[in-house]
Amino acid sequence: MKETSPRPPASPAPAAKTEPAATPMTTTMIPTAKTSPWQHPAALAGLGALLLWGGWAPWPTAWLVPLLFIGWVPYLLMERQFTLAGARKGRVFASTYLFLVLWNALTTWWVSYAELTAGIAAVVLNALLMCLPLMAFRQTKKRLGNRWGYLSLPIYWIAFEQLHLHWDITWPWLTLGNGFAAAPQWVQWYEYTGFLGGSVWVWAVNLLFFSWVVSKELKVKSEELKLLVDSSRQAVGFEFLTFNSKLLTSLLVIVLPIGLSYLIGATYQEKGPTAEVVVVQPNLDPYVEKFEGGAKFVPYDEQLTRLLSLSEQKLTPQTRLVIWPETALEEAYWENTIESNPKIRRIREWLTRHPGVALLTGITTIGSYPNKEAASESARFRDDLGYYDIFNTGAYFAAPTAPIAFYHKSRLVPGVEKVPPILASIVSHIDLGGTVGSVGSQAERTVYAAPANAPALRVAPVICYESIYGDFLAEYARNGATLLALFTNDAWWHDSPGYRQLLSYGRLRCIETRRDLARSANTGFTGFINQKGEITQREPAWIPTASRATVHLNDEVTFYARFGELIGRGAQLLAVLLLGFAIATGFSRKISQG
């Protein structure tokens, strides 16, 4: 009876491997085995760096700025590939660092014009620091899953950007919200959010586009979706709507903030009384002309003559303020004996001939301390001088006989003007054409008192690098400033994107504070920016010149200026909570599994 059992008919069971069904499955897996060269991690890292660089200022028009909205997508695709492949941590870190160091190098390579070592350090170290929020994102995604992971990414990044505004090695040049400096008409709402609102915008759109790209990939490769398409047109229509709705959402998240910005810009009117201001550009090459010892050094008396002459050319009876650039007076002036200096007496004589004109100039000053206890952390000591600080200073002459009001630059260039103790021995040999090592600074934002004949003119002195800090300039507005006066020496960076980027960043600060900005550069760009971030006047670079304009003196404080970096502080709080939750969850799982 066992021989009559229906075993032979069962022999087709091995043949029932469903070979025809297996064939399409094998076909769909081939693309994952043979990936396109563009899917290689190095290619994705390079593509991402190129996109972010292409979208950055200082391009003269805004047509490349949209690249910022897809600049992070290659990184996100690369990170997803590593996750699916179970790649080693070292490989993930190396590819992530490659992406970041390429972006830094492409965008800030010009720092090396001043000093090669400093330029390399800025690129290498900043890229390394940028890895921190991305590694935190990876760990959070690993422990809490994709939803929490991708939600944590912009939080960690913006928390890092906020930190990068305040610690000793601060270098927020590549804060994502600064990327819209070439398109200020798109971000008029910065008066509410500040530039970190732009960082949120960049991340929101990048994550949406990434989601769309992944959906597209799954749509093409999913065998289940193909079966649905073959069996039901209704299913096809539903999936088409779901797939394209992600693209539509991405586009809406771009278009709606731009539309809101144009609406705000169209209705905003310049505010405040007016005053006439002159800004001067002496055009002294800092490498060969500006400083003593240069091959074509221009004597300091001749430099002062040029400044006075250029100022005179633009003065009118209505002029209320003249601004000279950073370190226009370069010799070291002791603050306690400055009035005895012949050049200061010469300036006062010139002001006497032009009553009603105030002068703001960059100057290098030295302040002394009576003893070690009174000295600052940055103070130096010499047996013949005692304890003293060197300052990058703004000196304000409100009237011919008024006491000079000093402002000491507060946001110092890391590694050059401010050196953390751990790095002091490393950078001691770096020469950027000025004082290397920590220089003195001050904690508060000084707003110069208005002169008697221009009661609304309360000037905020902003020195060079300080203009990239939105929260920093907002403090001036809170302290009553009605005009931003930026004085800088852009010639360190030659004819490079550096000084163009710095000019563009000033446009964002005007929107955030709704203040006019008067800009005096040794050379670079000298001119004026209005409260909407529009460059109303700009003199050519690399020539001695001066410019005159009527500015508005607004005393209203914007939401952002009043409350500061709410987004940054909120992101830092959420980052701590998220990271703590992720770590606790990881430990909990280990305990439960062990």
Image: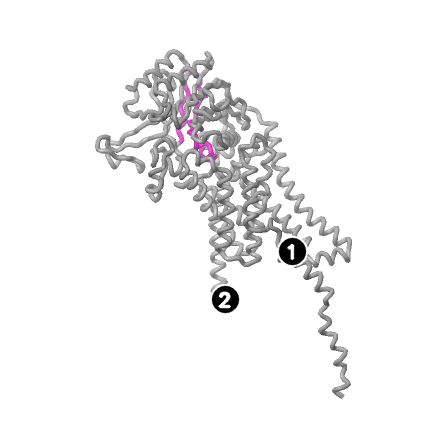
Which range is magenta? 445-472
Q: Position of residue 56 (x, y in %)?
A: 54, 36
Q: Nearer the viewer, mark 1 or mark 2?
A: 1
Q: Answer left or right for 57 relative to 280.
A: right
| Residue in the image at 44% along x and 36% along y | 112
Dot 2 crowding, Cα within 10 Å, few <14, some 14–19, many 20+: few
Q: Is residue 188 visible?
A: no
Indicate the amino acid at tag 1. Answer: Pro
Q: Answer left or right for 567 relative to 291.
A: right
Q: Answer left or right for 213 relative to 454.
A: right
Q: From mark 1 to mark 2, how far is it between C-alphas?
A: 36 Å
Q: Residue furthest bottom?
A: 1
Dot 1 crowding, Cα within 10 Å, few <14, some 14–19, many 20+: few
Indicate the amino acid at tag 2. Answer: Gln
Q: Is residue 461 magenta?
A: yes
Q: Position of residue 322 (x, y in %)?
A: 43, 19
Q: Residue furthest front?
A: 295
Q: Which mark is residue 569?
A: none
Instruction: Tally the numbered discs.
Output: 2
Residue in the foreground of this view, choosing between 1 and 495: 495
Quick one: quadrant of the N terminus? bottom right
Q: Residue furthest left?
A: 383
Residue in the foreground of this view, choosing between 101 and 546: 101
Examine the rendered structure and indicate whether residue 16 appears above or below residue 85: below
Q: Position of residue 430 (x, y in %)?
A: 36, 37
Question: Which residue corresponds to mark 1?
Answer: 31
Q: Is residue 465 magenta?
A: yes
Circle nearer the N terminus (1, 2): 1
Residue in the foreground of this view, choosing between 296 and 324: 296
Question: Which residue corresponds to mark 2?
Answer: 593
**Local SS, label 2:** helix
